[in-house]
Image (cartoon, rainbow, N blue to C red):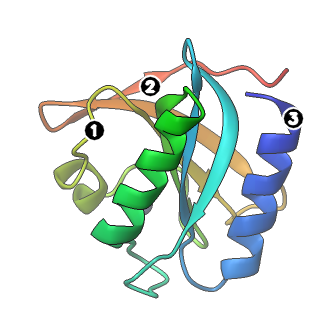
Amino acid sequence: MARPIWEEMVRHCNEERPNEACGLLSGRNGRAETIWRMENTEKSPVAFAMDTRQLQKVLQKMSLKGEVLVGIYHSHPTAPPIPSREDIAFAYYPEAAYLILSLSANKPELCCYRILQKQAFRLPFKLI
Ligand SMILES: [Zn+2]
């Protein structure tokens, strides 16, 4: 992940506080090159959901750029970066990495997961 993407993700998650923020990352070869802020239609501090129409629009713009969905991020304003039961239940994109940015400590903490068959596996990620 490029540093400007990381910075924009942290900015977005901070701006949405106390609610969870969510968004998408697209790029090539598992590398996040573009960040797309999404609206959290739940407007909740403990849950997020995306609007299907906005999702379709953004996925279309991605493919026009020649990029694919590589990651889905959301924030945990007060909880550690561990997927909740709902995060795992509603993970519909097995090919994408699920990123959780926790704002519960002094410094933002990011964890990355692959969610397959209702199980979350930690994935490594690199800031470059
Ligand atoms: Zn969550």
Question: Of helix, strand and loop, which one carries label 1?
Answer: loop
Mark 3 and mark 1: Cα distance apart in space: 24 Å
Residue 52 visible to the viewer: yes
Q: Quadrant of residue 46?
A: bottom left
In this figure, which residue is indicated by the disc labeled 3?
A: 3
Q: Position of residue 63 (x, y in %)?
A: 47, 35
Q: Mark 1 sits on what residue?
A: 93
User: Residue at position x 46%, y 77% from top?
Assistant: 40
The image quadrant where one finds the N terminus is: top right
- Label 1–label 2 contact, CB within 8 A: no
Quadrant housing the C terminus:
top right
- In this rendered view, identify the residue nearer to me: 54 or 106: 54
Q: Quadrant of residue 3?
A: top right
| Mark 2: secondary structure | strand
Alpha carbon distance from label 3 to label 2: 21 Å
Q: Nearer the viewer, residue 18 or 128?
A: 128
Which residue sits at x=26%, y=30%?
Answer: 94
Q: Of marks 3 and 2, which one's residue comes earlier in the chain? A: 3
**Three-letter amino acid code at the position of disc 1:** Tyr
Tag 3: amino acid: Arg
Residue hosting label 2: 122
